[in-house]
Image: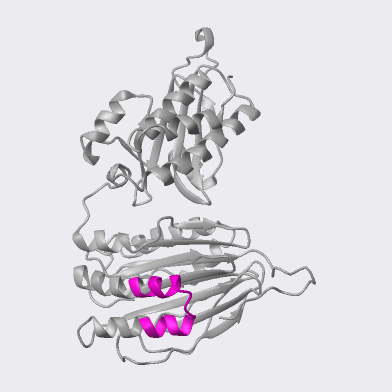
Amino acid sequence: MSHIDLRALLDLVGGSSPVEAIDVMADRLAVMLGADAVYFLITDLSGRAVARFGGTDANAAREREQGAENVPTVELPGTVYEQVLRSQEADLSPRADGSGDGGNGDGARLIVPVTDRGDTIGVLELELPWYPDAESVREIADAARTLAYVVVACRRHTDLFEWAQRSMPFSLAAEIQRRLLPGAFTCEAGRFTVAGWLEPANAVGGDTFDYALDRDQLHVSITDAVGHDVHAALLATVLVGSLRNSRRSDVGLAEQAAIANDALAAHSPVGDFVTGQLVRVDLASAEMAIVNAGHPFPLRVRNGRVEEIELAIEMPFGIEPGRAFTVQRITLEPGDRIVLVTDGMLERNAEDLDVEATLARTAALHPREVVYVLGEAVLHATEQNLRDDATVVCLDWNGGPVTGSDGTPVARPF
């Protein structure tokens, strides 16, 4: 095989438009590898399909330009694409058409994950006239990781990625709600891994989750606005906007909650409210601080045992302006898994879903898979008829405290 020159690849992509970057990269990879075809398939927003976004086939670009309804999609369940996305391992197999050098059947189909810090963006599929060895597969996997960075950079400038990812039209409420979610649903960062998932109700229920990492803290939130549709989405917008504004101003957790509470009270009718949990994890001391505003208790998985973390319950945001909020603290241990849910996971028509049993059963899975399994389980329990949004955030604490040069923990007060 020819060597993949990643620098040359990035230079070429950098000189193209964000709309053409994926096709340009696929074309260049095909030349470098002598591949018959190279395709990028992007994960659908539902998490249950992949759509062919770009590649060496000129028809793919035309299909994409004609609208999302013309983008070829593949349902994930039972496919090799699902296997690659779930396992995050490459799949190498002989080509079904038996083609290869000299037509002697030594060609291969290689599918590798396109992932950025644990966030599954899609897969790269290659049809090769030769059979790659382990070193060649590793080099192609490196190119797929580079493609992930290209996707992250390019999708800021175009709606084409969103078009390809939508298997059905969004309502206005759903559009608003999606803007409130983080750009990536999973983040791996050494000491922790965090992942979130939202299963929307038939009428959007105003759920959100969010996270952000700074130098020494991880910020996480999960919220649930009262009501449905645009009204709930607008309540969530005010609350999440306030939380982000305070967070970016380096405001303490209790003050952040108070500011958001007052903002919601000032900009919503009397009686409207949002429940939620605000979390800050000190990455040095392994201390987790929580504000619990009328929300279901978090769950902790420790040494295979699942239990609720019982907290003092504050009023939801927006009910009483001027209210102060209490910050509660727990200490994390390496191997702890903290799970936050909204009440859509616990509604009456989801009563067949045993969240604690599901968490026990999935203890060995990556957080990205845990939240997906819970999303699938709540859909099954409700027979695809969610009456309220069901949202989950899974945080795995992997490591102990960071220490300074003198061996003492480096911590920052909340």
Q: Looking at this view, is 248 or 51 the one in front?
A: 248
Q: Quadrant of the N terminus?
A: top right
* Chief SS of the magenta region: helix
Residue at coordinates 29% horizontally, 63% vertically from top-left?
A: 177
| Residue 359 coordinates in the image, percent (x, y) | 52, 66
Whether residue 79 is in magenta: the answer is: no
Tell whether 45 sits left or right of 29: left
| Residue 7 coordinates in the image, percent (x, y) | 55, 32
Report the magenta residues as a range.
241-259
Residue at coordinates 52% horizontally, 28% vertically from top-left?
A: 8
| Residue 297 coordinates in the image, percent (x, y) | 46, 80
Is any part of residue 355 visible from this angle? yes
| Residue 137 coordinates in the image, percent (x, y) | 59, 30
Q: Looking at this view, is 364 or 216 the one in front?
A: 216
Tell whether 61 sits left or right of 325: left
Q: Quadrant of the C terminus?
A: bottom right
Task: Please identify the quarter of the rendering in which residue 122 is found.
Answer: top left
Tally the numbered discs: 0
Q: Please tell me whether residue 328 is drawn above or below residue 280 in the rendered image.
A: below
Q: Please tell me whether residue 265 is drawn above or below residue 411 in the rendered image.
A: below
Whether residue 249 is in magenta: the answer is: yes
